[in-house]
Image (spheres, rainbow, N blue to C red):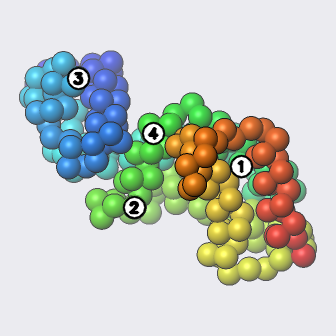
């Protein structure tokens, strides 16, 4: 058995993400991936059992990086406004630094390919966020809302602006750039909707 090369594994992962973002899941075959990574098909199987394993490992790694980035400086016990703003800033920074990874995770999250795991970084992240929201509700910093309504209000505006920014276009086709000022304005309006 050949030894694993971290650089080759990274190239395989990055080319696979690029192919999926640009061509969709149907555009990813092991042969096309091998050509794009300039390696043999058999080399891919040193790192991944099959296509499904590759996809799940890619998603798990991207989510782990996103969670790590999102949680920087965050504490579920912190003041709600400060904590939510930190979440927005951390998430925005991740998206700007890793637009392909963000696109890939959104595609994968909304596909039937995803396999949920209880120990996945996403579960740890969601548990921290549940505690954060429960603490804020108990302290009277925000109104008590059903979880789906809370997430729609707290993050819906953020992800809509991120989509416009990445597409460089609004729904009406007007060019769009998300500035810090627009992000802050949207955040303040979001906070008004969440406060008691």
The residue lying at 34 percent from left, 61 percent from top is: 111
Query: Do the residues bearing badges 1 and 4 touch, measured as CB atoms within 8 Å?
Result: no
* Labels 1 and 4: the sequence-earlier one: 1
What's the distance in space between the residues labelled 1 and 2, CA to CA? 22 Å
Q: Mark 1 near mark 3, Cβ–Cβ under 8 Å?
A: no
- Which quarter of the figure is the N terminus placed in? top left
- Residue 86 seen from this side: no
Residue 121 shown left or right of residue 129 in the figure: left
Residue lying at 74% horizontally and 38% vertically, measured from the top left: 179
Label 4 environment density (alpha carbons within 10 Å; few <14, some 14–19, many ≥20):
many
Vertical order, 174 against 97 (above or below): below
User: Which of the pair 15/13 is nearer the observer?
Assistant: 15
Name above or below for residue 110 compared with residue 97.
Answer: below
Look at mark 3 in the image and give the residue it sits on. Answer: 37
Q: Which mark is residue 87?
A: 1
The residue that mark 4 highlights is 101
Q: Is residue 49 left or right of residue 84?
A: left
How many numbered badges does the structure rendering display? 4
Cα separation, mark 2 vs mark 3, equals 26 Å
Q: Secondary structure at mark 1?
A: helix
Q: CA distance from mark 4 to mark 3?
A: 17 Å
The disc, 1 or 2, on the residue closer to the chain's N-terminal end is: 1
Q: Which residue is mark 2?
A: 110
- Quote the CA–CA distance across marks 1 and 4: 18 Å
Q: Are marks 1 and 2 in contact (CB under 8 Å)?
A: no
């Amino acid at each position: 058995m050949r030894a694993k090369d971290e650089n080759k594994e990274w190239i395989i992962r990055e080319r696979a993400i690029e192919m999926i973002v640009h061509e969709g899941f149907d555009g990813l075959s092991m042969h096309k991936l091998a050509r794009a990574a300039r390696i043999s098909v058999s080399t891919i199987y040193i790192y991944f059992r099959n296509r499904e394993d590759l996809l799940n490992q890619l998603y798990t790694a991207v989510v782990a990086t996103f969670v790590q980035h999102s949680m920087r400086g965050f504490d579920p016990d912190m003041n709600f406004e400060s904590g939510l703003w930190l979440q927005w800033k951390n998430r925005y920074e991740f998206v700007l630094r890793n637009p392909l990874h963000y696109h890939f995770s959104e595609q994968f999250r909304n596909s039937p390919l995803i396999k949920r795991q209880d120990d996945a970084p996403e579960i740890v992240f969601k548990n921290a966020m549940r505690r954060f929201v429960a603490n804020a509700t108990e302290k009277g910093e925000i109104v008590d809302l059903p979880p789906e309504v809370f997430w729609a209000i707290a993050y819906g505006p953020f992800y809509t602006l991120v989509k416009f920014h990445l597409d460089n276009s609004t729904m009406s086709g007007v060019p769009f750039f998300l500035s810090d000022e627009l992000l802050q304005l949207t955040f303040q309006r979001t906070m008004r909707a969440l406060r008691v």
